[in-house]
Image: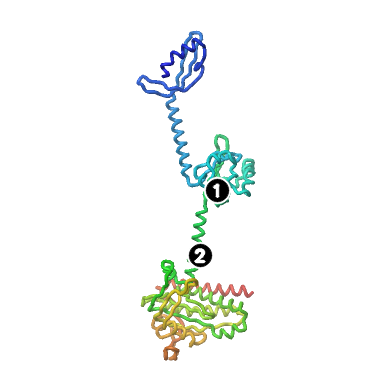
Amino acid sequence: AIADSHDSYVKHYLDTGIKKMIGTLREVTAYRKDGSTFPCRLGLAETKESGLICGFIHDLTEEKAAEAEILAKKRLAEKIIDAAFDSLFVISERGIIEMVNRASTTVFGWSQEEFIGQNISMIMPTVHAENHDDYLKRYLKTGFKKMMGKEREVEARRKDGSTFSCILGMSEVDNGGTKQFVGFIRDVTLQKSLLLAQAEREASDSLLFNILPEHIARRLKQDPSHIADLYNNTTILFADIVGFTDRTSVMSPHDVVMMLNDIFSRFDYLVDVYDLNKVKTIGDCYMVTSIPTDELENDGCSRVCRFALDMFKAVRAFNNTGPRHGQINFRIGIATGQVVAGVVGTKRFLFDMWGDAVNVAARMEQSGLAGQIQVTKEVVESAGPDFNFERRGTLTIKGKGPMEVFILKSAQEPSGRHSELDRRKSNSSRALRAFSMLDNYHDS
């Protein structure tokens, strides 16, 4: 079509002198001999002396290919930016929004058209929006970077006026001598909710594991129905303060609680050292058992016995602090045998135990001697050769009749197979000394 009108254009120019292309440049398409076309830049000029019209043609094939490649990369970059989950804002030195991605419109509620040309303060709560322009001015003037190149948690505002927590990161970009600022905004509302829920679950789990033995707590989490099991081999210990009623009758409630908390905290630490199960405290009575199991051969009984001996070390450490209401003493009773154990309650869980062995352990404590650990014959047989027992004789035990009872006197140091227990005992000794030092500090 251009070729067909070329001769008439030249004739029209010669007749009228109207220059449509003479002395100008324009992009046109040219044909090669082989029929292919290519883009080119055409310039025409007239030589007055000869009356000739000269044409200058510059092949634009490579330039057009380069431009197409640049345009394709730009479009790809825009697609990548739009595919980002985080909001992206590009603003000028004056804080004017020049570019946003698709995530920004989704998160904040404004369209791209509503964003472009507006001040970035539109997405900030009022208290921060008022200071934003001053911050940019101060940065451009002094170079002082408060947020540039960093991330921090801030509040952002949506179109509907609601606010949300987000992570804001800002970077400076030099665009041909003109500064632009790029802001990346990540909505962390969901993450914070998940973290809060996780923290609450961990706190709940921690409380549950603190109340119940670990294996029972895990079962309860998986199946909240009632747990009740029969265990053939469990060792039970009861400890009771001698003369507690008479002593506390002259003490204030605060002093009673402080005394029990001090001594029972020392016992609690030893429970962890020996990996035992603290069942409960009732007044001044402290109940501990081995971890219930069906295994006939285990060291639960020996650990309870070592725990009992260390309880008196803890009591001596407490007495060495010079308690204001005088020194205390305990009776301790231990029995071993079959028990029924289960979780009681739906609000304040309690892993309690029942059975003949529990009753006998309580009777061992009640009929025991101050400052002594009274045990049954079954405990002597189960504890192993590392312990020294002294036969006390035969006592009439309520509900059982005559029973042969023994006094636990001492224990040998754990053998090599108990190296982990030995390490824990070393730690417990240091802890008891620390308790004493803390008591001395408070008393001073």
Instruction: Give the amino acid type for the residue marked by disc 1 in the picture.
Output: Leu
Kindly give the residue lying farthest to the front in the view shown. Answer: 160
Instruction: Locate residue 223, reporting x and y percent.
Output: 41, 68
The image quadrant of residue 241 is: bottom right
Q: How is the image coloured?
A: rainbow
- Dot 1 surroundings within 10 Å: few (below 14), some, or many (20 or more)? many
What is the tally of numbered marks visible in this picture? 2
Instruction: Locate residue 169, reporting x and y percent.
Output: 54, 47
Q: Which mark is residue 196?
A: none
- Under circle 1, the secondary element is strand
Instruction: Locate residue 14, reporting x and y percent.
Output: 49, 10
Q: In the image, 66: left or right of 184?
A: left
* Placement of 25 over or under 237, stated as above or below: above
Instruction: Locate residue 440, reporting x and y percent.
Output: 60, 75
Comparing 193 with 41, the one in front is 193
Comparing 219 with 426, the one in front is 219
The image quadrant of residue 34 is: top left
Q: Quadrant of the C terminus?
A: bottom right
Question: Which residue in the protein does label 1 denote?
Answer: 168
Residue 130 appears anywhere in the view: yes
Q: Quadrant of the N terminus?
A: top left
Q: Using the numbered discs, state the Cα–Cα distance from disc 1 to disc 2 in whole angstroms.
A: 30 Å
Instruction: Give the amino acid type for the residue marked by disc 2 in the picture.
Output: Ala
Q: In the image, 199: left or right of 254?
A: left
Residue 384 appears anywhere in the view: no
Kindly give the residue lying farthest to the left in the view shown. Answer: 34
Q: In the image, 257: left or right of 365?
A: right
- Under circle 2, the secondary element is helix
- Dot 2 surroundings within 10 Å: few (below 14), some, or many (20 or more)? few
Kindly give the residue lying farthest to the top in the view shown. Answer: 49
Question: Which residue in the protein does label 2 denote?
Answer: 203
* Placement of 221 over or under 322, stated as above or below: above
